[in-house]
Amino acid sequence: MEWTGNLGKGTSNYQAYDRAHVISGAGKQIKIPGSSDPSFKGDRSCYNPEELLVSTISSCHMLWYLHLCADQGINVISYVDNATGIMGEFKNGSGKFESVTLSPSIVIDGHAAMQSKAIELHSVAHKMCFIANSLNFEVRCEPKILTNDVEGM
């Protein structure tokens, strides 16, 4: 993590600096541009920490889910999650997440009978997710499973 928002006066006052930063890692080719939420003088074109946390939860869940589906012979064709988070703010300006809801839309190969197993695997993925196991707020999963009926094609 590197703060790149020094506009020449450092943090001499709240208005004097930009919230820009870059997330990078050893051996990683891509740097992720970060900022604070626009309500805290951030750049809306960059990722803020709250968005990154929600996307991290979603990513960890998805990776476990794909693993479990592969082990169970469920062929996932597509997976898109529109995860959302609810935060509460305190009087002092701080806050915390109250909950995150994962809303994956998934297409699997096969017939409708496979849908129930595909839905069940979400609760297993949730129990396996390192990130979800590390949080002190509720993470819900509301999946939609569609089939790409290979027999009817």
Image (spheres, rainbow, N blue to C red):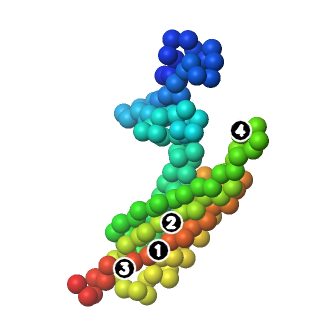
For disc 1, the neighbor class at 10 Å (few under 14, some 14 to 19, many from 20) is some
Q: Is residue 73 visible?
A: no
- For residue 20, above or below residue 49: above
Which residue matches tag 1?
Answer: 144
For disc 2, the neighbor class at 10 Å (few under 14, some 14 to 19, many from 20) is some
Secondary element at image label 3:
strand
- Tell me the mark number nearer the camera, choosing from 4 and 1: 4
Residue 54 bears which disc, if any?
none
Check disc 1 and give the amino acid type: Lys
Q: Label 3, label 4: how many angstroms apart (C-alpha)?
A: 46 Å
Q: Position of residue 107 (x, y in %)?
A: 37, 72
Which residue matches tag 4?
Answer: 93
Which residue matches tag 3?
Answer: 147
Name which quarter of the figure residue 100 lies in: bottom right
Secondary element at image label 1:
strand
Tag 4 or tag 3, which sits nearer the N-term?
A: 4
In this view, the residue farthest toward the left is 153
Tag 2 or tag 1, which sits nearer the N-term?
A: 2
Q: Are marks 4 and 2 in contact (CB under 8 Å)?
A: no
Check disc 2 and give the amino acid type: Ser
Q: Are marks 2 and 3 in contact (CB under 8 Å)?
A: no
Check disc 3 and give the amino acid type: Thr
Residue 14 horizontal side relative to residue 67, left or right: right
Which residue matches tag 2?
Answer: 103
